[in-house]
């Protein structure tokens, strides 16, 4: 056991991701400066663009909703010792399922359509995760590689379906007809209007609340139920899981299906809440943002909420930036996203070791207190 | 290498003032050691005494914080295995450092290929190895992949690797741990032969028998320090054991004679096969009665671990029957969870691999395996306050220090980890306890505590099966002793009739003639 | 004769599609054999595609472009190695980070430097691209029945990188099985501890392997933007990095089988573009997506042991540390 690597828990969950974020932002600022724009100015524009106005906040939370679903998906798999790179494909197929429900049950009232759409989205995502999970549990193929392959398979399947089958008649771009009005998620500003609060219009919708509920449910499941406990045991130490009477293969399947189900809910926000039809490539990389969000949020729902909001703000602020700084476009946000994954995930040890030594030194200096 | 024959030979290896810490652990304390050329030198000590650390320093795998190493009288700076090899030091590690899917030849030349391309080096190596095989009787099939060879041959490849690199000093770390007695005999023969050819051998072990059998001199280590050094011929196993443990060995645990009651666990004709379908446990039958401790002795790797896991339900069973609490389990029927419900408890041999989750807190480890028990659940949710309280109680009754349920399991000492695992298993009030290596990696103070607890459990009418590779522990604890060899139970002794010699013979697979 | 021409043209296209796959796959074979998961092929290729197209556009030299492509890709490989080998970070996470960062960085820099929506300018001046090399007499040979077309389309008429990639396979095989480096590389991916105790630096070997992968991905990326096409466009690798990795797995981490897998995958791609909208007898129009998905399906089936069995280097994905 290498002694100097342990950090106090609070530092591990707050300080370390913040340092990682700071490092990513500093490098990004360097890139912005290299492009000939002022990083400080860019930062101010990003903040005002994402939180400066009511509709900006609405957009930020709308993006954040996607990332909460995919971030939670990555986290649940992570706690079972699995790395789910397939949230993108699971979100895609899940969206197809809930989209079909919205198309098919257009005559039902909203309160009947919604639960079915939620279940369908979860089922679609879960199904797309089940196959790689089953292949790992029973056939020993690695879930990382299979889920990547399944991303491509999801993409091919969806392109085929949208181009050849689901496309609305007379339509040029590969997308379905629009969902009926009551088969869409009510927007937050509409809901607020009903209780007499006026709020600027934005695609921020009820799916945000569903994402918060999902986060709470994940927390209760992982840390407050025996099934979550067993899942975490299997993730940390599969042999100990066997000892505790838990089948690691079973946990692999359950965790991946839950993970896929969470990712599959992305369509509730993106399609049912905003696009109101099934369009091509609607996950738009949210599955990969989920990796960054989960890593930064330390695979904890609370952390994931904050990280998702941060990335939502980055996406919204980034599109604002494009208007004011002609040399910068939204791709810069993707760069920041990659750097956050690098700093908070892969290079964690670069920061952890010096930090741990700092803490060890401070503890020594302050002397034994017990 | 060629020393002047007129000057009295400098020691082959000399260590001066070696000191090494790993964080808070002082693994080596100012060690001084001289090992004569052409001798077999034993280094003995309990697990954790610092022997392996010292040898890893000599081999350049770890760096000493202080001190120097002399080879043939000259100070050498050993920073990596490369330096050690250059200084003529070879090491056979406890876990072999072989590439399983490489051939013997490829393994031997790895690192000393003799050029950027392989063809020439391989040819030369083949000739050289054939010569070594002739001269030393070290025959191995050069083109066979390592994973097709039995363990004894794999070890021979390790020795060949060292010799091929020109090793004059050969360090063997616990070389017999994985060998059958026959293979061990062959190894000792080989080592004697090497000594005859002027090589120096350092044998690191915790087994007294081996020291007595082969070494010329022996150094005893305890808690990171050298506590004695002597000619092997003038010492005795008892003397060495006392020095290893640091007091007169009375691992005789205070206890009254056992009063065995009715059988609580019966095993009939149990057979276990591994993934390669090789039988590991063969036709084992025995009974475990209420109020007795049965010790299962044997050289490590003779089927004890597989038997233990088969009984606990964590390992496979090929065929046979287990009866407990009136239930007959055929082959692998019922998993660990169901067996726990039938009153079975299991303290596994390797607690960090099987018995605990190092990254979890103490309280989360205190419910491992019992996570579905009604006591820890309220409806669909875990009963967090109850779990915390339960852990505090267990820590108190088993004197776990520090008594902090929120502390990470990995940060407790070995003894306290073991006490917590034992507490967890005892808490469920089982009728049968399976305990593997109860005091492995546990400090002396905790050993006494744990032994006392086990005897108390026996007196409370539980049936205990203790698996240990430490003969002293078996002799101290057990009321009845089973000895395993080659997957079979080769003998059963009542404690009153058992002696170290008798058990030793059985462990070596030599059965007493039936009278 | 018409069918024959089609077959030959499809095969020629196969070679062109296979080239970047093969380069990246052989690169990945090295890093994976050393025990490091090489999911970053995509990012390294994309980075190289951008750097080479940008430098070629500015300097007017495809060769300088190639150098820049290799440089960018090796730099990314070094970042990856620093995170995963030196600091023992999670290899999958590091690779994904690189892939994502590069997918944003290319268009960002492209926009700032060239101001045409994140692309690089068209490379149309001579010397800015790797041009096709027409073998002597290729035009004339075209009229010779059967073999003529093979000579003109399959042997002749590719750029230098294609020929280089073809020569790479025997070289890689020799290095892997006949050189000291290859022996050590194969050992370190199976049992790094054995390599360490044999006095060889585990990290050194892994760095070398990852740099090799960086160089080869650099060439592959350069091929995409300065040979197969004439500029860098957003996400132009389009999953080729992952496909190359699939090819290594399909090729069981061995050079010649990997070549076979690359050709097979490239053939499905060439076939897909050939069959687009074409009605075949009996089956009718096969949706192009199904053909394109074939390599992924095959890889999944292989990994699951339904077709053959792929056994990865044993130590792959596990950061090496002496103290366990």
Image (cartoon, coloured by chain):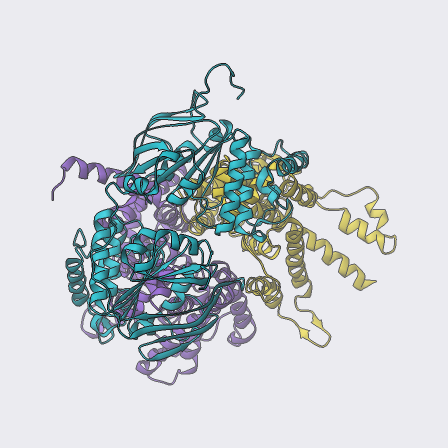
Q: Colour of chain A?
A: purple
B284, above or below B137, in the image: below
Pinpoint residue B81: horizontal percent, then vertical percent: 47, 33
Q: Residue at x 17, y 63 (%)?
A: B388
A331, above or below B18, in the image: below
> Residue lying furthest left in this view?
A370
Residue C53 visible, this orientation: no
Quarter occupied by the C terminus of chain A: top left
Quarter occupied by the N terminus of chain A: top left
Number of callouts in the render?
Answer: 0
> Residue lying furthest right in this view?
C144
> Residue lying furthest bottom in this view?
A107
Pinpoint residue A203: horizontal percent, then vertical percent: 33, 66
B286, above or below B12, in the image: below
- In this rendering, would C91 be left or right of A23? right
- In this rendering, would A95 be left or right of A13? right
Residue A360 visible, this orientation: yes
Q: Colour of chain C?
A: yellow
- In this rendering, would A302 be left or right of A267? left
Question: Between residues A355 and B101, which one lies in front from this camera angle?
Answer: B101
Pinpoint residue A347: horizontal percent, then vertical percent: 37, 44
Question: Between residues B326 and A61, which one lies in front from this camera angle?
Answer: B326
Q: Colour of chain B?
A: cyan
> Residue lying furthest top in this view?
B6
Q: Residue at x 65, y 63 (%)?
A: C272
Pinpoint residue B474: horizontal percent, then vertical percent: 32, 56
């Amino acid at each position: 056991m290498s002694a100097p690597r342990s950090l106090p828990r609070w530092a591990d969950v707050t300080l370390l991701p913040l340092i990682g974020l700071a490092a990513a932002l500093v490098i990004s600022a360097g890139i912005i400066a290299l492009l000939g724009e002022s990083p400080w100015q860019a930062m101010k524009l990003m903040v005002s663009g994402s939180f400066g106005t009511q509709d900006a906040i609405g957009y930020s939370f709308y993006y954040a909703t996607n990332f909460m679903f995919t971030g939670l998906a990555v986290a649940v798999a992570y706690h079972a010792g699995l790395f789910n790179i397939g949230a993108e494909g699971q979100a895609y197929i899940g969206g197809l399922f809930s989209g079909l429900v919205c198309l098919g049950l257009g005559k039902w009232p909203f309160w009947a359509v919604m639960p079915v759409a939620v279940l369908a989205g979860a089922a679609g995502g879960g199904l797309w995760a089940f196959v790689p999970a089953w292949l790992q549990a029973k056939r020993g193929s690695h879930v990382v590689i299979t889920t990547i392959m399944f991303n491509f398979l999801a993409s091919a399947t969806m392109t085929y379906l949208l181009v050849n089958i689901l496309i609305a008649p007379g339509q040029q771009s590969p997308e379905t007809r629009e969902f009926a009005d009551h088969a869409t998620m009510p927007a937050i500003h509409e809901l607020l209007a009903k209780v007499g609060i006026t709020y600027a219009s934005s695609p921020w919708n009820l799916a945000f609340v569903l994402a918060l509920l999902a986060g709470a449910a994940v927390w209760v499941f992982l840390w407050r139920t025996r099934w979550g406990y067993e899942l975490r045991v299997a993730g940390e130490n599969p042999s100990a899981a066997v000892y505790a009477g838990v089948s690691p293969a079973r946990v692999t399947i359950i965790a991946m299906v839950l993970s896929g189900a969470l990712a599959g809910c992305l369509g509730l926000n993106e399609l049912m809440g905003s696009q109101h039809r099934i369009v091509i490539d609607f996950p738009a990389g949210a599955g990969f943002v989920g990796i960054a969000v989960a890593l930064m949020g330390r695979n904890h729902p609370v952390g994931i909420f904050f990280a998702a909001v941060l990335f939502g703000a980055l996406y919204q602020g980034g599109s604002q930036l494009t208007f004011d700084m002609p040399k910068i476009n939204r791709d810069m946000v993707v760069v920041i996203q990659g750097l956050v994954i690098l700093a908070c995930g892969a290079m964690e040890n670069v920061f952890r070791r010096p930090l741990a030594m700092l803490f060890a030194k401070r503890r020594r200096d302050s002397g034994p207190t017990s | 290498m060629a020393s002047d024959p007129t000057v009295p030979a400098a020691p082959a290896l000399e260590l001066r003032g070696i000191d090494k810490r790993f964080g808070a652990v002082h693994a080596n304390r100012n060690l001084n050691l001289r090992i004569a050329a052409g001798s077999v030198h034993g280094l003995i000590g309990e697990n954790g005494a610092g022997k392996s650390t010292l040898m890893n320093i000599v081999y350049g795998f770890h760096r000493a914080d202080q001190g120097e190493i002399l080879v043939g009288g000259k100070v050498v700076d050993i920073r990596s295995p490369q330096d050690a090899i250059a200084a003529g030091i070879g090491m056979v590690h406890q876990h072999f450092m072989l590439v399983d899917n490489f051939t013997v030849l490829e393994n031997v030349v790895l690192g000393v290929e003799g050029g950027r391309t392989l063809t020439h080096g391989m040819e030369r190596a083949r000739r050289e190895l054939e010569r070594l095989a002739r001269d030393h009787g070290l025959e191995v099939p050069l083109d066979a992949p390592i994973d097709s060879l039995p363990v004894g041959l794999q070890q021979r490849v390790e020795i060949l690797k060292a010799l091929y690199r020109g090793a004059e000093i050969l360090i063997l770390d616990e070389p017999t741990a994985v060998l059958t007695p026959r293979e061990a005999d062959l190894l000792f023969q080989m080592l004697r032969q090497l000594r005859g050819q002027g090589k120096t051998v350092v044998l690191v072990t915790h087994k007294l028998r081996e020291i007595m059998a082969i070494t010329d001199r022996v150094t005893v280590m305890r808690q990171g320090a050298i506590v004695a050094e002597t000619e092997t011929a003038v010492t005795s196993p008892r003397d060495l054991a006392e020095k290893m443990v640091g007091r007169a060995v009375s691992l005789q645990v205070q206890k009254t004679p056992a009063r065995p009651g009715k059988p609580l666990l019966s095993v009939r004709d149990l057979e276990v096969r591994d993934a390669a379908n090789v039988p590991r446990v063969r036709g084992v039958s025995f009974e475990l009665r209420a109020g007795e401790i049965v010790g299962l002795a044997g050289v490590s790797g003779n089927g004890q671990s597989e038997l233990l896991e088969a009984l606990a339900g964590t390992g496979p069973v090929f065929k046979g029957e287990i009866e407990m609490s009136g239930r007959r389990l055929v082959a692998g029927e019922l998993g660990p969870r169901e067996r726990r419900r039938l009153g079975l408890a299991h303290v596994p041999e390797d607690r960090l691999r099987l018995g605990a989750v190092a990254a979890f807190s103490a309280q989360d480890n205190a419910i491992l395996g019992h996570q579905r028990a009604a006591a820890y659940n309220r409806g669909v949710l875990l009963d967090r306050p109850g779990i915390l309280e339960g852990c505090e109680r267990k820590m108190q009754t088993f004197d776990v220090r520090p008594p902090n349920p929120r502390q990470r399991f990995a940060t407790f000492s070995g003894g306290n980890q073991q006490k917590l695992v034992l507490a967890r298993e005892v808490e469920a009030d089982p009728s049968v306890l399976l305990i593997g290596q109860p005091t492995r990696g546990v400090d002396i103070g905790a050993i006494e505590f744990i032994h006392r607890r086990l005897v108390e459990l026996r007196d409370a009418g539980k049936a205990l099966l203790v698996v240990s590779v430490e003969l002293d522990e078996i002799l101290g604890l057990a009321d009845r002793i089973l000895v395993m060899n080659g997957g079979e139970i080769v003998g059963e002794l009542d404690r009153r009739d058992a002696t170290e010699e008798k058990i030793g013979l059985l462990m070596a697979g030599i059965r007493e003639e039936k009278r | 004769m018409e069918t024959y021409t089609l077959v030959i043209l499809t095969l020629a296209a196969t070679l062109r599609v296979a080239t970047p796959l093969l380069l990246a796959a052989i690169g990945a074979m090295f890093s994976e054999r050393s025990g490091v998961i090489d999911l970053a092929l995509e990012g390294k290729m994309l980075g190289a595609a951008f750097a080479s197209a940008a430098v070629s556009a500015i300097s007017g030299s495809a060769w300088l472009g190639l150098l820049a492509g290799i440089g960018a890709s090796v730099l990314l490989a070094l970042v990856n190695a620093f995170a995963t080998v030196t600091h023992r970070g999670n290899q999958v996470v590091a690779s994904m980070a690189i892939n994502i960062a590069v997918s944003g960085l290319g268009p960002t820099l492209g926009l700032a430097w060239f101001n045409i929506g994140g692309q690089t300018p068209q490379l149309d001046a001579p010397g800015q691209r790797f041009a096709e090399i027409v073998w002597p007499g290729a035009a004339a040979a075209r009229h010779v029945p059967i073999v003529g077309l093979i000579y003109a389309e399959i042997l002749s008429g590719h750029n230098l990188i294609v020929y280089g990639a073809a020569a790479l396979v025997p070289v890689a095989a020799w290095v892997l099985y006949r050189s000291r480096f290859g022996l050590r590389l194969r050992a370190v991916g199976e049992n790094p501890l054995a390599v360490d105790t044999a006095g060889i630096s585990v990290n050194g070997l892994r760095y070398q392997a990852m740099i090799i992968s960086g160089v080869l991905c650099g060439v592959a990326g350069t091929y995409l933007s300065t040979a197969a096409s004439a500029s860098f466009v957003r996400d132009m690798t389009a999953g080729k990095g992952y496909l190359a990795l699939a090819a290594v797995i399909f090729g069981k981490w061995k050079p010649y089988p990997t070549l076979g897998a690359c050709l097979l995958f490239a053939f499905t791609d060439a076939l897909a573009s050939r069959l687009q909208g074409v009605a075949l007898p009996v089956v009718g129009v096969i949706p192009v997506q199904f053909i394109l998905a074939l390599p992924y399906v095959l890889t999944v089936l292989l990994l699951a042991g339904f077709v053959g069995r792929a056994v990865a280097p044993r130590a792959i994905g596990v950061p090496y540390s002496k103290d366990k």
